[in-house]
Amino acid sequence: MIDNTTIVETAELITPPMMQPQELITPYGGELVNLLVNGEERNELVRQAASLPSVQLSQRSLCDLELLAVGAFSPLRGFMGQADYASVLENMRLADGTLFPIPITLPVAANSGIQPGQQIALRDATFNLIATMTVEEVFEWSLADEAERVYQTTDTRHPLVAEMHGWGGHYIAGPIRVLNLPRHHDFVDLRRTPAEVRSLLAETGFTNVVAFQTRNPIHRAHEELTKRAAARINGALLLHPVVGQTSPGDVDHYTRVRSYKALVRKYYDGARTVLSLLPLAMRMAGPREALWHAIIRRNYGANHLIVGRDHASPGPNSAGQPFYGTYDAQHLLTKVGPEIGMSILPFNEMVYLSEEARYEEVDHAPKGAATLSLSGSKVRSDYLAKGASLPEWFTRPEVGAVLAQAYPPRHQQGVCIWLTGLSGAGKSTIAEVLTELLAEHGRQATILDGDVVRTHLSKGLGFSKEDRDTNILRIGYVASEIVKHHGLVMCAAVSPYAATRDAVRAMVGADRFVLVYVDTPLEVCEERDTKGLYAKARRGEMKGMTGVDDPYEVPVRPELVLTTSDSTPLDNARLIINHLRDKGFLLNDATF
């Protein structure tokens, strides 16, 4: 719920010299790239696009294309070709030496048939025309290489690394002509291009601008921090929340923006504050992401950026450890910030001095003073999960009211129980028993059984790795929609591959995903073999049987491990009930 953008150890950082907007270091913050086509040229391209082969863009690629089109990614003029891509992976620079830390690429399937020299149409999820591309390059890429170099890990607990497993084997690049920006019907008054934001900032009359990157609600500590930052540079404040793809489980942008608007309207100085939305698809890439955010905000007119502890961190890895060093982002930006004309503003942790009724940086607080603070986990577990009001010292009443409306008590929130294990392990039987126990506790459950889903939702899919992944991702998508709308869903599917399970975890949201490994030995599953699948595989009549000639990747650190050789389905269902009760998804027996 709370990000850590307020927490920076000033003693460990050296702030580079403050730079004025007129001290532009090209190509950052100067003339913006504009890929939009208008007039008769646009009309002609629209007519041509009707007969062109199409690529349907993912939500991530759509966000990237929108920001490419308006110049937020300047100096990029399109999706990266192979030379730029390789250089960014190697040294965070484009092939011409320009600093740019994140690969902006357009993935397609290896069997897409797209060839260099071909012209294609780029369309959104509902097939609306967005742009045309003249393909100049089609090149292979290595998931392991990109993941290790850019995200410093191949661990699929990193949400983007998990997502990358479904991207396809090739990237394409070439000149783009944008005919229509993606359609947005929400908060249209706050959706501004870099040029429009720069114009608004100029109207404030301040030469210095500090930007605040956020993907979470702004609480009192953040409010104090941002106001101090603007005062420190005697400048304007750009509140620039991300409303594209953020970290799974984050507060939805509709809720966040409603709270931002309430805060700016009542508690910020309108003469020096600009609130504008950024349709960015975050990568959660830690230090590289922080530098990327700085370049983007430079293009929007800022010359200072607040960078916090664990900036753009995706949470713990499979071993329960952070993916990045706590202060790696600040160190990187301190080193290269001057090259892009950006200074970072380091602040220490903000704490509330209860006796003085004010916030202060922890290292400036009077010795022995009584202080108050709340962690994100405490906000979720002790307040929102219980339907309790957040204390006014922590958050403004307007923000608390918005969050309370969006987040019902934990026992009314959605959750996905994902049962994985070999065929015949007992997943479906446990799910059936669990359904009745959940009803006894006042919660109705939807069951998505792997076999049933293959009969309907995934009819026609085979058992290749690609088809299996597609089947699991379809189940995951349906489950994520049920959870989003506060439903409880149980998914019983072999789901043999760790990367795909982690992709589903990211899709649903880690704090609402319970991975249950039904650990039944292969020999026991073969003895049961109610479907006769193992017998067919052993006779050579069926290929790709998990556990026989296709691997099952045992989950690392699942929420629960169940055994069926020495426990009944009822025993195991009760263990899941206990876990859900401990996490607050079920009321204790004494309350009903």
Image (cartoon, rainbow, N blue to C red):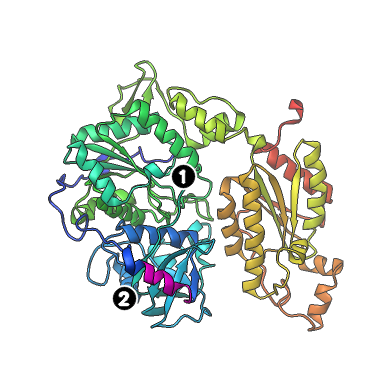
Viewer-proximal residue, 409 or 240? 240
Residue pictured at 44% horizontal, 60% vertical = 62
Q: Is residue 335 visible?
A: yes
Location of residue 473 in the rendering, given as x and y in whole percent from the top left corner: 62, 62
Viewer-proximal residue, 426 or 256? 256
Question: What secondary structure is marked by label 1?
Answer: loop
Residue pictured at 35% horizontal, 76% vertical = 82
Q: Is residue 414 magenta?
A: no
The crowding category of the residue bearing disc 2, from other C-alpha atoms within 10 Å (few below 14, some 14 to 19, many at least 20), is few
Q: Is residue 543 left or right of residue 253?
A: right
Place residue 81 in its image quadrant: bottom left
Seen in the picture, residue 38 relative to 172 is either above or below; the reply is: above
Quadrant that contains the C terminus? top right
Q: CA distance from mark 1 to mark 2?
A: 38 Å
Task: Write down the residue under mark 1.
Answer: 186
Q: Is residue 450 left or right of residue 41?
A: right
Residue kind at label 1, given as amino acid type? Asp
Location of residue 34 in the rendering, given as x and y in whole percent from the top left corner: 28, 61
Q: Is residue 219 visible?
A: no
Task: Write down the residue under mark 2.
Answer: 83
Q: Which residues are magenta?
A: 43-52
Tell me the number on the disc at residue 62: none
Which circle, 1 or 2, is nearer the viewer? 1
Location of residue 576 in the rendering, given as x and y in whole percent from the top left corner: 73, 45
Q: Earlier in the sequence, mark 1 or mark 2?
A: 2
Q: Residue furthest top?
A: 355
